[in-house]
Image (spheres, rainbow, N blue to C red):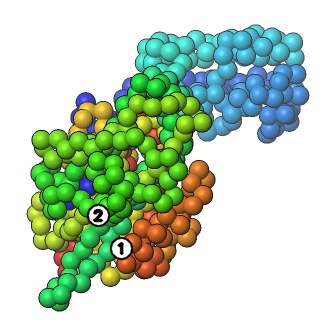
Amino acid sequence: MTVARSGMVEQSSVSDGFAVAALDVARALGAGLREVVEQISSDQVRTGPEFASIFEIDDNLAWKLLSIAKPGTSPDVLQKVPGESGMRTFFRAAQRKGASDKSIARVRAAMVAYQSLIDTHAGDRAGLDSLLSNLNGAERTSDVGTRRAAFRANSSLLGVQADVQVSAYFFWPEQHADGKTSSAMAILRGYGGFRRLRSDVAWILGRGRRTDHKGRAYGQAFPQPVDAEMAELHGGVPLVRLFSSDKMPPVRRTIMPDGMAVDRLLPGPVGRQASLTFFLAETMRPGLAEANDPDNPSLRLVTSTHTPCEQLVCDAFFHKDLPPLGAISCVTGSELGGVSLGHCDPCDRVKLYMGAEIEDHGQGVETLHIDNLPRYPELLGNMCRRQGINPDDLRSYRVKVDYPPVASAVMFERAMLAH
């Protein structure tokens, strides 16, 4: 079962040819720099300031060179290679301090190989940094600075931005009059500090429908708004009055032929003075599929990001009395191909590595703070009380991503276990 809010080849590791070439260049450059240092100083150089003092260069340049010169060099140190001006400064300093022409020539030759590596495999320095960041199957955090730059660029191009986008999924059991039990779920989603940068922008705040793993409609046809009065006042958009800005955003809901509900923010004023914090919340039943449902072997909770935001926060809450579920896992990936992570076969996912890890907050909601939404734990508690749930009976999980790329997604997944 998939709950989705919102180039199909899995990201491959960098080719062996590049990895070998990068390692060779890193080792050659490191060995050359060590030879120069050993000619000038009989003592082992351990810190940037020591390196800077010996060569009489600035600390920043010294730290970069020392990182490359340390034994056991790995290819990623090539991200620290100084630019042409920095290397000219180093070569002049080495000559001034008495390094041999032969040892300096060795470093120069390594720099020629470094430039050849860029020309052959990357095209430019930025491309090389990207390739190096994705060595070994990309099992490392992407550069936050790159994502921050993308956030700024997309904000300018698209005309909107937000401080934070949030989503929270609640699951709990329900007892019926006939003695049978089932499960229910609630979805809370929203934005803190949402603002337009162009007044003519009409922005899709979210689109969603409930489907199985094959993309077919599943369960309750239409979710029920948590705040029915607010939804009626806003054309069916399930806005929540509490904890939102005093002035609610102008919105419109459209139900598409395939059952997709699309909520749009209408054009309006721009800038921080007109920024909005607002939330939408609705319930769905059943909350969980049956454990023996072959079309829904796992629960997949997908939060898509199409709005440039500084932070994405995804929370998931599971009541202690629910049927047993498998271990919780998390995937982050791109949805630029137009297919939700929830509908992709794992081998078709375009994965993104953004340092996202699952935080287990234990029972309750009190520790789930968000800097830009200081009353967020209160909002979670209010959501629980509206559904008759004790927050202390919920096991809480969180994933955070800083500057998530536009058209990316976070997906929680738990297997449905037989019971």
Amino acid tagged 2 = Thr
Amino acid tagged 1 = Gln
Residue for point 53% across, 65% down: 377
Q: Is residue 404 above or below residue 391?
A: above
Residue 390 visible in rendering: yes
Q: Which mark is residue 387?
A: 1
Residue for point 39% across, 72% down: 386
Residue for point 60% across, 58% down: 374
Between 6 and 70, which is closer to the camera in this rendering?
Answer: 6
Residue 302 visible in rendering: no
Distance between mark 1 and mark 2 Cα atoms: 9 Å
Residue 396, image quadrant? bottom left
Q: Is residue 31 above or below residue 301?
A: above
**Residue occupied by mark 2:** 283
- Horizontal and vertical percent for residue 177? 18, 87
Q: Is residue 12 left or right of residue 37?
A: left
Q: Is residue 8 above or below residue 241?
A: above
Q: Which mark is residue 122?
A: none
Which quadrant does the N terminus fall into? bottom left
Residue found at the far bottom of this picture = 179
- Horizontal and vertical percent for residue 315? 43, 60
Residue 257, image quadrant? top left
Neighbour tally class for label 1: few under 14, some 14-19, many 20 plus, Cα within 10 Å = some
Between 55 and 132, which is closer to the camera in this rendering?
Answer: 132
Q: Is residue 133 above or below residue 156?
A: below
Q: Is residue 8 left or right of residue 96?
A: left
| Contact? badges 1 and 2 (CB < 8 Å) | yes
Question: Judging from the image, what secondary structure is the residue with disc 2 in?
Answer: strand
Which is more N-terminal, label 2 or label 1? 2
